[in-house]
Image (cartoon, grey):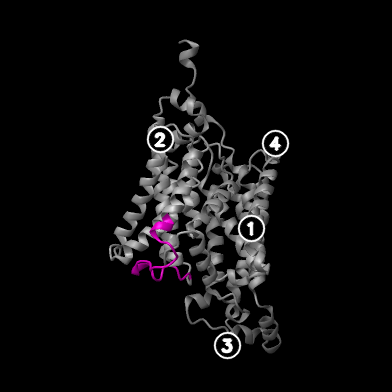
């Protein structure tokens, strides 16, 4: 057998290439929990069912817009769709006008229209890039300008009403809502898509289009498919945006372009193509929201919006500069697990958040009044949620967190391959979720709700 025949194909070389995306999540994860601690200390109301609910309804359009950008960015050629914001606005104002004429009161009709509108625009953009051979940045900039003007023609000023079934979607008073379901299903869809051969072809094309063509990958079909996926997520983002504002706005949607691109870069994506992750994009979107939320707790007066934009840029530049140090970190840490790092930092951040919202004054008032036997006899367990608020459950959670942090840090700096710690990772993640539910269900506003004292 000749050397040429034995040589691996470009696709095989790509598949065997070491995945170094884990170390790239070090900066986004650190930034995420740093901002979460700042937000919890500045405004403890965030750590509550209503706080998480309102955060979800605001965060959902940005997250889905970031997912939409991710598909085309992975495809390469610097395909950053600058028109993603105006496209969301176009679907929004079109939906509002259809609702005003009584044509979009059905759930399936609304979802079908929004997704088809997003896909139609993205396919048109893909055809212009492939067959007209226009640079993607020119096509996306043209789309941005055209969509901005079309939106003003369709709806000159903000107004109108969202479909009736969306009336309660944007309240944001509870964690569990249809908006959360859309985001969860959209994220699960991306994770399932990553397991397909099409995704491998997409990444190979984005990394080296010439090598992908040599390997026999139909690059035109793959690029069109990437734009179709982007259009689907743009339609879902428009649905969540419409639920958020409950009306139509021809200009507000354009703000998502800058925010989504910034979130994508903060999540470690390469605008040159071939590299982006669901976890990184989600963390980047949450970071953008936390920056805005934290800054809203300060009073900058008329400069508020300018300070927010300045902060976006400063955080983005700082993250890119710190990313330059990642190769040096990677040489010192042979096996880095972003999951274990996430768990360790999450445990610390959760402890700080609980400290920020715990009312120690009620605890100080209750301690002198009741002795220990009286305190335990005064516990009220009227329901399973109240039972979880007992002192035993509370201190059990504290002990668990105290034991988890050293163990996770030890695993973090040791060999952390999926084969030897995946069970521990799943157990600890489940336990942290249960602790979070425990914290929310017991009413963190006062110590009396945790102690159950009459």
> Residue at position x 59%, y 43% from top?
22
Q: Nearer the viewer, mark 1 or mark 2?
A: 2
Query: Residue 279 versus residue 227: which sits nearer the camera?
Result: 227
Q: Residues within 10 Å of mark 2 (few under 14, many from 20)?
A: some
**C-alpha separation, residue under disc 1 versus residue under disc 3:** 36 Å
| Depicted 162 relative to depicted 257: above or below | below
- Looking at the image, do the residues carrying marks 2 and 3 touch, with CB atoms under 8 Å apart? no
Q: Secondary structure at mark 4?
A: helix
Q: Is residue 272 visible?
A: yes
Where residue 449 sits: x, y (%)? Answer: 58, 80
**C-alpha separation, residue under disc 1 versus residue under disc 4:** 25 Å
The residue wearing badge 4 is 331
N-terminal of the pair, mark 1 or mark 4, is 1
| Depicted 191 relative to depicted 349: above or below | above
N-terminal of the pair, mark 3 or mark 4, is 4
> Residue at position x 70%, y 45% from top?
322
The residue wearing badge 1 is 33
Residue that lies at the very extreme toward the bottom in this rendered image: 369
**C-alpha separation, residue under disc 2 versus residue under disc 4:** 35 Å
- Looking at the image, do the residues carrying marks 1 and 2 touch, with CB atoms under 8 Å apart? no
Identify the magenta region: 151-172
The residue wearing badge 2 is 222
Q: Secondary structure at mark 2?
A: helix
Q: Nearer the viewer, mark 2 or mark 4?
A: 2
Q: Nearer the viewer, mark 2 or mark 3?
A: 2
Q: Nearer the viewer, mark 1 or mark 4?
A: 1
């Amino acid at each position: 057998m000749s050397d040429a025949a034995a040589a691996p194909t470009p696709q095989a070389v790509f598949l065997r290439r070491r995945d170094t995306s884990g170390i790239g999540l070090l900066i986004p994860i650190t930034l995420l929990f740093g901002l979460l601690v700042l937000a919890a200390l500045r405004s403890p109301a965030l750590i509550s069912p209503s706080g998480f609910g309102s955060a979800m309804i605001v965060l959902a359009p940005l997250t889905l817009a970031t997912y939409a950008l991710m598909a085309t960015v992975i495809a390469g050629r610097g395909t950053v769709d600058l028109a993603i914001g105006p496209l969301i606005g176009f679907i929004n104002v079109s939906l509002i006008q259809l609702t005003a004429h009584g044509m979009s009161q059905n759930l399936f009709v609304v979802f079908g229209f929004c997704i088809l509108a997003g896909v139609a625009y993205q396919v048109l953009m893909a055809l212009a890039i492939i067959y007209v051979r226009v640079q993607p940045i020119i096509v996306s900039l043209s789309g941005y300008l055209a969509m901005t003007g079309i939106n003003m023609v369709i709806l000159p000023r903000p107004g109108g009403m969202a479909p009736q079934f969306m009336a309660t979607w944007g309240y944001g008073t509870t964690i569990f809502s249809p908006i959360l379901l859309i985001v969860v299903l959209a994220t699960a869809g991306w994770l399932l898509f990553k397991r397909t051969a099409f995704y491998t072809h997409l990444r190979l094309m984005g990394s080296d289009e010439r090598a992908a063509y040599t390997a026999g990958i139909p690059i035109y079909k793959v690029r069109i498919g990437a734009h179709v996926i982007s259009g689907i997520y743009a339609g879902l983002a428009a649905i969540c945006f419409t639920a958020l504002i409950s009306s139509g706005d021809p200009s507000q949607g354009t703000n998502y372009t800058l925010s989504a691109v910034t979130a994508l870069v903060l999540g470690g994506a390469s605008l040159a193509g071939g590299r982006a992750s669901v976890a990184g994009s989600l963390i980047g979107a949450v970071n953008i929201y936390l920056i805005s939320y934290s800054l809203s707790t300060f009073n900058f007066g008329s400069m508020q919006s300018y300070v927010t934009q300045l902060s976006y840029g400063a955080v983005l530049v700082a993250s890119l500069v710190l990313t330059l140090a990642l190769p040096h970190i990677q040489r010192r840490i042979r096996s880095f697990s972003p999951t274990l790092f996430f768990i360790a930092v999450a445990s610390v951040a959760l402890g700080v958040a609980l400290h920020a919202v715990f009312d120690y004054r009620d605890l100080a008032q209750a301690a002198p009044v009741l002795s220990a036997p009286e305190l335990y006899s005064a516990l009220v367990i009227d329901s399973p949620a109240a039972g979880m608020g007992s002192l035993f459950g509370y201190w059990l959670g504290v002990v668990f967190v105290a034991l988890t942090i050293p163990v996770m840090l030890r695993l973090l700096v040791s060999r952390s391959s999926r084969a030897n710690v995946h069970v521990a990772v799943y157990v600890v993640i489940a336990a942290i979720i249960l602790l979070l539910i425990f914290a929310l269900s017991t009413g963190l506003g006062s110590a009396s709700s945790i102690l159950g004292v009459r």
